[in-house]
Structure formats: structure tokens, C-alpha cells
Amino acid sequence: MSKSHKTALDLRSKDDLILVAGAGGFIGGSLVRYFREQGFIRLRAVDKKPLGDWYQRTPGVENLCLDLSREENCRRACEGAAEVYQLAADMGGMGFIERFRVECLRSGLINTHMVEAAWRAGVDRYFFSSSACAYNTDLQKDPKVRALKESDAYPALAERGYGWEKLLSEIFCQEYWAERGLKTFIARFHNVYGPWGTWDGGREKAPAALCRKVIQAKDEGSRRIEVWGDGTQTRSFMYIDDCLKGIDLIAHCDRLIAVPINLGSKELVSVDGLIALIEEAAGVKVERVYDPAAPRGVAGRNSDNTFIRSVFDWEPDTPLRTGLARTYAWIEQQYLDRKAGKRTVS
Ligand code: NAD
């Protein structure tokens, strides 16, 4: 990657206040840790969950429990912030977003109030975590899908609920730049996975859910797992470290102000292929029992990385095999900890 690309370290002073919203969750919690490790000393982490339920808590950070669907809480959260990373959302894997569309749409309250509060507070940079679910679903009907490029969001036919909310919130970001001069940055994440992600409880995504099922099947000796769909659906999965690096690059690239950009891996894999990699990490083979009636999402989705490569000469590149091995090991430890009565993330 060329040195001309800026990150927070290049553009900020170490005592500028950085706000991460949704910091009790997977990506937000990891982002707080990332900035702390870079030496930033004034970090504010906000989430509506009680502190005891946060996935990660980084020492030396101001942690606030606030419901950001309320305008006054967004104002409190943004006070004095130089940069805002808006990752708070009511979301989960297909099992959640197909069943709870109203909850997904209500994240619009968070995004509406947060961007306004950031603008009023005079924030310098505002990052919004959008999603590949904002893309036109008509283009995702074939497992051998053509990778989605940024222009494929329009004409719009987003994922019902969750995807439409993301698309509208993207538009808010674009208009806050056009009309009010707030520098906004919009990344469309494609499935993120890794340690510290949700792995049980109904909001987990396919890689974590399948790791857990394989771990359990191994532990209980059944050697059999239930698979949602018929195993042919395809996706790409981005490792968390790539996601954090991408967020930092995107939020500090002025060429990308108010311009949505894919942040995802282009390594396409079927659900069956994903299970094979998990079996490799686990050192076992399992019998797969398919449930075609279960939530499965679109038939295929991949990230076209032409644009991000052209901007940064970089794209998320952790091989799925490598990231999954780390994720599997972390979930296995969580599983064992829970069995031993210890506190775990999910
Ligand atoms: P997550 O569920 O682990 O974290 C989201 C956090 O937001 C949770 O801790 C939740 O408590 C918090 N939150 C929800 N409503 C809130 C409210 N009203 N006020 C304050 N906090 C609230 O999810 P994640 O995987 O870390 O995702 C972070 C962001 O990235 C989300 O906006 C999500 O839509 C987006 N995204 C994630 C993925 C992925 O694969 N994980 C893919 C595309 C987009």
C-alpha cells in the first residue's frame, strides 16, 4: 500500500476525542481497542447494553451506556468529539434480520439523531457502517453471482428492513455533506467475522454459528450439524482485522467523502465450502442435515473490490482459512468457558 494514504495517526492528535457508537458489540468493541493500541488517549465508547454485557472493555476508555435512538443521548455522546464512528444498530445474522425487520428499520432513529448530533457538535469526520444488504437483491439470485460494485445499489431493491434502513442512512450521510458540510464516510461492509463476534443466541452470523455447531457436535459426539438452506448459497467473509484497517483508511480519505465504498473480501465461498474449512480447523468431519425452510438470505453475494483497490492499492486480504482457524479457536474457548460456568460474550 502506498504511503500517501492517511490514517487517524496521520491526521489526528493523540488527545483528540474519538467516539465509537455501538462499542459494546463486535466491530465497535474491536475498533475501540484498535484506536487505543494506536495510542489515542481520549476514547469514548457508547452502547445501550449494560456495561457487564459489552463484548470487550478496553482499559482507559470512557464508557457510556446510552440509548442512541434518543436524540438527547446522541448529543451527549457527540459532545467534544473530533471523530465519530457510528456502528450502533439492532442487527444480527439472517435469522435476525429476516424475522425482525421492524427492529432493523428502527435503527433509522439512531442514524438520524447521530448524524445531526455530530453535525451540531462540529465533528470533523463521521463514519457510517453501511452494509452489502443495501444492494439490489435482484442481482443476488444466483450462487455464481457477479460481484457487487458500488453502483449496484441503484435502482434500489435492498434487503427488506435492514437493507433499506442502511440505504436511507447512507443518503442522510450524503446530504449532510452536500447541504451542511459534514465530512461523512460510508463503508458497505460485507459479512465480518472473527474473535469477539456474536457466536450464539440468535444474532450470530453463518461462520460463527457453523463453528459453534461443529464444536458442539464434536463435544457431544453426535458429529452431525443442522445447516440452514441447501449449502449452495455463496458469500464472502471479511476478517475483523481487515475491517478495522479499512475503516481507518476510509474515514481519513477525503476522496471518499460521502461516497459509499465496499469493504469486504472477494473470496467467494459456498456454505458447504465454509463448513469444509471449519471441519479442517476442528480436525473432524460432520454429517450435514440441510434445512431448506430456514432463513438463508440471497442466493449469492460477493464484493467487487475494483474501487477500493484503485483508491488504496489495498483490499481486505486475510485468507478465509487463516481467519477461520483463529475464529474457531476463539469460539471453542468460549464454548468451554461457558461449560465451565465462566462469563462469555454470547
Ligand atoms: P453488534 O450487534 O455486535 O454491535 C452493534 C451494537 O450496537 C450492539 O452492541 C448493540 O447493543 C448496539 N446498539 C443497538 N442499538 C443501540 C442503541 N439504540 N443505542 C446504543 N447502542 C445500540 O454488530 P456488529 O457486527 O459489531 O456491527 C456493527 C455495525 O456494522 C452495524 O451497524 C452493522 O449493521 C454493520 N455491519 C456489520 C456486518 C457484520 O458482518 N458484522 C455486516 C454489515 C454491516
Image: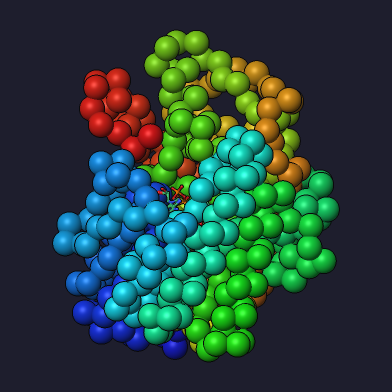
Residue located farthest toward the top when viewing the structure as drawn: 221
Q: Position of residue 106 (x, y in %)?
A: 57, 52
State the residue in front, 319 or 342: 342
Task: Check the image and report above or below for 48 versus 96.
Answer: below
Q: Position of residue 142 (x, y in %)?
A: 81, 46
Residue 242 seen by the camera = no
| Residue at figure coordinates x 35%, y 46% from the top left | 49
Task: Check the image and report above or below for 191 versus 335.
Answer: below
State the residue in front, 209 or 91: 91
The quadrant of the rendering that contains the C terminus is top left
Task: Check the image and report above or below for 214 versus 273.
Answer: above
Residue located farthest toward the front when viewing the structure as drawn: 72
State the residue in front, 316 or 250: 250
Q: Is residue 344 left or right of residue 213?
A: left
Residue located farthest toward the left when viewing the structure as drawn: 60
Task: Check the image and report above or below for 303 versus 292.
Answer: below
| Residue at figure coordinates x 64%, y 44% from the top left | 101
Q: What coloring was used for the rendering?
A: rainbow
| Residue at figure coordinates x 42%, y 12% from the top left | 220
